[in-house]
Image (spheres, rainbow, N blue to C red):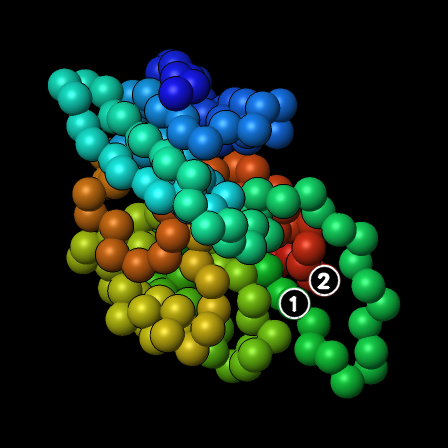
Amino acid sequence: MKQIDARGLACPAPVLQTRAALDEQRLSAVTVIVDNAAAQQNVSRFLTSRGFNVQASQQGADYLVVGQAGQASQASVAEQAVPAKPARAATDLAKIMVMCAADRLGSGDDVLGAGLMVNFIRTLKEMGPELWRLVFVNSGVKLAVTGSAVLDDLKALEAAGVTILVCGTCLNHFKLIEQKQVGETTNMLDIVTAMQLADKVVNL
């Protein structure tokens, strides 16, 4: 069994290192060692997307992700090479990605900014089916955790088919990984790939 020591590596290096090992060798089993829960979730999701049966466990300060080859599954958008965008028919919906890099909107007055962000999230549903990805980074991840004023709104968007990505490195930084209540814990590879595939990216 191939063992990959990805401890001490920042996002998205553990996933990239694992992907490189799988691309270079026809592995039927692999163990990846990481040192934080966000990396464990990201590596687990990647291996699952490659058709591996995955078991994750914690040993002291480390996390072990063990993958055994199973039936091949379709790789997720974030882990496969980015295809060229096909020409979009006039009747096709645009894919809009919204990136929230803070838990408040604008600068000047923090209380006002927090209220504006709440109103913005609650109004996003008006974009309809064109809203494709909602990405939270930096302090924006605080909107996806326990106690967030927009948690129910985000869950409703997710239930309606919007993919919500929450930066694992950011959750770790704010010590909020265990409090995430909505969306997928993700890494910068997923985010960059989503930006490439989106028809439009809105940055806040």
Q: Nearer the viewer, residue 173 or 64?
A: 64
Residue 21 visible in image: yes
Q: Amino acid at mark 1?
A: Lys
Which quadrant of the structure image shows residue 115? bottom left
In the depicted structure, whether residue 129 falls above or below residue 196? below
Residue 12 at x, y percent in the picture? 50, 30
Who's the residue at 33% across and 21% down the image?
33
Who's the residue at 31% across and 59% down the image?
182
Tag 1 residue: 95
Q: Is residue 42 left or right of residue 62?
A: right
Q: Is residue 86 left or right of residue 161?
A: right
In the depicted structure, whether residue 168 falls above or below residue 183? above
Residue 88 at x, y percent in the picture? 81, 72
Earlier-in-chain disc, 2 versus 1: 1
In the depicted structure, whether residue 139 falls above or below residue 120? above
Tag 2 residue: 199
